[in-house]
Image (spheres, grey):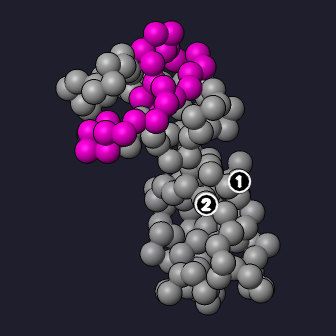
Amino acid sequence: MPTVTLLGTRLASPGTEFVYEGEADGCAGCPYRSQCLNLESGRAYMVTDVRENAQTLECAMHDDGVRAVEVEPTTVTANVPSKGAFSGSKASLSGPCPYVECPSHAYCEPDGIEFDREYRIQSILGDPPHETCHLDRSLEQVELDPTD
């Protein structure tokens, strides 16, 4: 079920994905705090609809203001250990990776997923985008469900 929240007008379009990071310093004293700060910190969301006829509200954090949108938690693409990785099983990330130039780095340390938790695998996407893992890990690229 969608949740209505406020989002910066530049991000307020269906299909936009973001990770909600919680309250910022500029949120203190804002009259719209309860409508804005109603998501789970660290979770990935996708905009499913923009409320029509809703006015743009001033915001200390978004220079073009904010609009009312509907969002839903979304899956996160990640690399997990290949062993035991199949649709419906649970998996966790292998751990931090210092190789930030690797094409898989964003999938080995994805936003919206914690290292010390297990998540249900929604689907298997296949091989990660790297040719060789510098940490010698055998990985599979999957869609993880952070809501489980």
Residue 45 shows in the view: yes
Q: Magenta span: helix, strand or loop, mainly?
A: loop
Rate crowding at label 2 as few (under 14), some (14 to 19) or many (20 or more) other CA atoms within 10 Å: some
> How far from the left and from the top, in percent, is residue 105?
35, 40
Above or below for 90 versus 62: above
Q: How far apart, in angstroms, are the residues tagged by discs 2 and 1?
A: 8 Å
Q: In percent of the image, x 38 and y 43: which residue is there? A: 106
- Where disc 2 sits, the SS reads loop
Q: Is residue 140 left or right of residue 144?
A: left
Disc sitting over residue 21 in the figure: 2
Q: In percent of the image, x 42 and y 29: which residue is there? A: 79
The residue lying toward the viewer, choosing from 121 and 55, is 121
Q: Is residue 11 left or right of residue 65?
A: left
Please give the count of numbered marks on the rendered protein.
Answer: 2
Q: Is residue 42 left or right of residue 96?
A: right
* Quadrant of the rendered image containing residue 60: bottom right
The residue lying toward the viewer, choosing from 13 and 128, is 128
Magenta stretch in the rendered image: 78-105
> How far from the left and from the top, in percent, is residue 71?
62, 57
> How far from the left and from the top, in percent, is residue 72?
62, 51
The verdict on residue 95 being magenta is yes
Q: In the image, what residue type sits under mark 1?
A: Glu
The residue lying toward the viewer, choosing from 120 and 3, is 120
The verdict on residue 8 being magenta is no
- Where disc 1 sits, the SS reads loop
Q: In percent of the image, x 45 and y 40: which residue is there? A: 109
> How far from the left and from the top, in percent, is residue 11?
47, 69
Image quadrant holding the C terminus, namely top right
Residue picked out by circle 1? 40
Q: In percent of the image, x 46 and y 10: which residue is there? A: 83
Mark closer to the observer (2, 1): 2
